[in-house]
Image: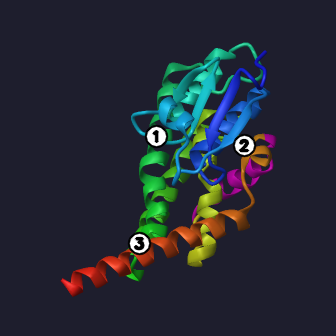
Amino acid sequence: MASASELMLLGTAESPFVVRVRMALHMKGLPYEYLQQDLFDKSDLLVSSNPVHKKVPVLIHGGKPVLESLAIVQYIDEAWSGKAATILPADPYQRATARFWAAYADDKLYDAYVGINRAVTEEGRAAKVVETLAAVEQLEAAFAQSSNGKPFFAGNSVGFLDLAVGCHLFWLETMGKMSGVEFVDTGKTPLLAAWAKRFGETEPAKQAVPELDVVVEYAKKRRASRAAAAAAAAAAATAN
């Protein structure tokens, strides 16, 4: 049994990858100390723990840092293999498939919806909206394949791929609210929409996912900051 002093998590409340790790910790019933980080003024602990990327999340277990959210989830599952439910599938094929779709969610889905907020033109945002919708449709097919008609990607209970995709749901909802688009749509992606509702009602999600209004305000501030930087760069280029 870990104590909070043995486990520390460095993170930011708005990061889907930090939320993923927090959900895994809650699934295993592990107490931990959460240290909120300012990514614009990075702490010495964050820099020394992750000197290559200087990013969150970082899980520190017994003084040793574990990096990258998917690797951290696997570490949690293996280090506390006898505690609570198993997170990763036991079957090698199912495990490989889950890892593939987890990487897809982090590469294609994340890049698309973050791109909506990072775009500085309406045309750029529209293109990223299309990319996001396409990625969600791919995950609808993945859910049909992985769940075999059961409530979650992992079957009857939450597992690795549920965490890997589920941590992105609150950002999809945030971008949808800001863009006027329902990305997980009951008409176009009914299986994923039903799963998203079920997943949001699980204890790991309730414990780890931040309030939507908080994330919306954070996203608006980031968008305004990028727009101001783009305007300043354009003005400087014109002056030159």
Residue extent of the magenta highlight:
186-203
Q: Which of marks 1 and 3 is in front?
A: 1
Among numbered discs 2 and 3, the one appearing first in the sequence: 3
Mark 2 belongs to which amino acid?
Answer: Pro
In-image side of 22 versus 201 (left or right)? left
Question: Height in image: 140 above or below 217?
Answer: above
Amino acid tagged 1: Lys
SS type, badge 1: loop
The residue pinned by badge 2 equals: 151
Q: Residue at x 47, y 69 (%)?
A: 116
Q: Residue furthest left?
A: 240
Judge depth for marks 1 and 2 and give the one in front.
Answer: 1
At label 3, counting other C-alpha atoms closer than 10 Å, the crowd grade (few under 14, some 14-19, many 20 or more) is some
Q: Residue under circle 1?
A: 54
Mark 1–mark 2 distance (CA, rounded to whole Å): 37 Å
- Which mark sits nearer the N-terminus, 1 or 2? 1
Q: What residue type is labelled 3?
A: Ala
For the residues bearing labels 2 and 3, Cβ distance under 8 angstroms: no
Residue drawn 50% across the image and 34% down it: 68
Q: Where is residue 155 in the image (x, y as percent from the top left)?
A: 68, 35
Q: Which mark is residue 106?
A: none
Observer able to see residue 182: no
Q: Does the magenta stretch include residue 200?
A: yes
Residue 78 can be seen in this image: yes
Q: Position of residue 127 (x, y in %)?
A: 39, 72
